[in-house]
């Protein structure tokens, strides 16, 4: 039974890791698709800083929605298990970390890529 728990946790981490990679890749594709849009924003008079803020807000908005909905989902499942199955709070914390750490790292990677891409797009 202990090995099954370990296998399930490893599976959850791997699934979250693959999902995080797909989100990061999606932001990379969006950056390529929006490259001309950012250049056009610079042409109409926005500064690099303003365009960078728009780009950051896009990423931050996505992750804000992700954290809100995922947090509600995870907390509702945790509360259900705590009430019905009386599982340990430590296990709830581990499951929460299995979600928070990969997506937190993905958010950081997207932030760093957006910061670097803005410099490349606008010639700084």
Image (tube, rainbow, N blue to C red):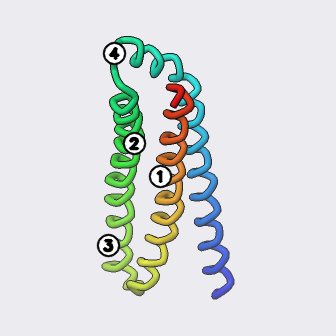
Mark 3 vs mark 2, CA separation in Å: 26 Å
Which residue is at 33% across, 66% downward?
75
Which residue is at 54% across, 35% downward?
117
Circle 2 packing at 10 Å, graded few (<14), some (14-19), many (20+), is few
Circle nearer the N terminus (4, 2): 4
Q: Residue 56: x and y, percent?
A: 39, 39
Mark 4 vs mark 2, CA separation in Å: 26 Å
Q: Nearer the viewer, residue 96 or 59?
A: 59
Q: Nearer the viewer, residue 122 or 36?
A: 122
Q: Could you say which disc has been placed on residue 62 in the image?
A: 2
Mark 1 vs mark 3, CA separation in Å: 26 Å
* Secondary structure found at label 4: loop
Q: Is residue 72 above or below residue 43?
A: below
Which mark's residue is nearer the viewer, 1 or 3?
Answer: 1
* Secondary structure found at label 1: helix
Name the quadrant containing residue 45: top left
């Amino acid at each position: 039974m202990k090995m099954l728990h370990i296998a399930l946790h490893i599976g959850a981490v791997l699934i979250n890791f693959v999902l995080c990679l797909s989100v990061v890749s999606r932001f990379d594709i969006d950056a390529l698709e929006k490259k001309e849009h950012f250049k056009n924003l610079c042409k109409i008079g926005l500064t690099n800083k303003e365009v960078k803020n728009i780009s950051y807000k896009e990423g931050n908005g996505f992750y804000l929605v992700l954290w809100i909905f995922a947090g509600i989902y995870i907390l509702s499942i945790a509360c259900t298990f705590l009430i019905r199955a009386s599982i340990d709070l430590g296990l709830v914390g581990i499951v929460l970390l299995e979600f928070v750490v990969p997506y937190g790292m993905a958010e950081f990677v997207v932030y760093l890529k957006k910061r670097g891409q803005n410099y490349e797009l606008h010639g700084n």
